[in-house]
Image (cartoon, rainbow, N blue to C red):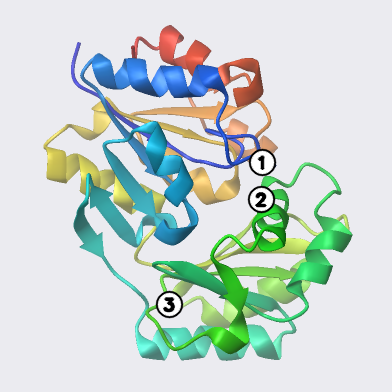
Amino acid sequence: MNRKIIFLDIDGTFTEPESNIPPASAQKAVRRARQAGNYVFLCTGRSYGMMASLLTYGFDGVVASAGAYILMGEKVIYDSPLTERQKKMAMDVLEENGIFRTVECRDGAYTDEGLKDFLRLHSTEGRNSELLRWREQVEKSMNIFPMSEYKNQPVYKLVVMCPSVEALVRAGDELKEDFQMCIQDDGRRGYANGEVINRKINKGTAVKYVCDYLQVPIEDSVGFGDSMNDKEMLETAGLSICMENGNEKLKKIVDDICPCVAEDGLWKAFQKHHLM
């Protein structure tokens, strides 16, 4: 069997949306896959500082900030924050459109005042794993601080939330030359959220970079995800798998669908596709 590189999204994939602790079956699947000689990477939109507790479960590497910051072990192999021009442009356009902004830096994130109340109001509605995760982290202050404490550290991406999907679309159109606006929810429930990502970087470009770095053919990569910010990763990986709890649009473009992680989905998929 050729050595594989497995890329795992976190929220709704390696862990349940409201938990930062993966089920025992997911932990075991990662251990067994690595014992079989495969590489396993976390591949997430989170900043590096917002995922520290998960690194204790044992991974070969990390793709953080939707591909803008990549580590192999403890070695940084890719580091590409926004330019000052890009950051200012994004911050100004989002503010003008009434959108809550969270800037993600390497070791933490800084968010606009009022976001906590917005999350309390909307995050229990529907099955939006991103809002559930953000409510959990903001409530517990997991390296998420008020925007007033931001001291101009390098920014890797922005998370955006607001009552109207139209506002996100409008801002995305203004920013489209430099950024991709990845909208996670369609706004039908009275809220919308997403990510503003450097157009040249995403989880898909990260998959290619890691494969090149490790000299593993792209067809021997495997991607697991559940939301639209996993789209490029799943389109790029040699084998793409969406969780049963995942976005319905995403399910239409993948090679396979597995049960949710709470139902031992990763373990079953690793077995099915001979990753252990």
Quadrant in which residue 33 is drawn:
top left
Labels 2 and 3: the sequence-earlier one: 2
Q: Position of residue 265 (x, y in %)?
A: 57, 18
Q: To which residue does mark 2 refer? A: 133
The CA span between labels 2 and 1 is 6 Å
Circle 3 sits on which residue?
178
Circles 2 and 1: CB atoms closer than 8 Å = yes
Give the answer, above or below, for where 98 lies relative to 220: below
Q: Earlier in the sequence, mark 2 or mark 1?
A: 1
Q: Earlier in the sequence, mark 3 or mark 1?
A: 1
Give the alpha-carbon distance from disc 2 to disc 3, as whole Å: 27 Å
How far across and down, in percent of the image, does residue 49 sit? 43, 60
Q: Residues within 10 Å of mark 1 (few under 14, many from 20)?
A: many
Quadrant of the snapshot with the C terminus: top left
Q: Is residue 235 visible?
A: no
* Amino acid, disc 1: Pro
Q: In the rendered image, which residue does mark 1 sit on?
A: 17
Instruction: Work out whether 252 lies above or below 145.
Output: above
Q: Is residue 250 visible?
A: yes
Residue at 29% of width from left, 69% of height from top?
80
Instruction: Tell me: 266 left or right of 83.
Output: right
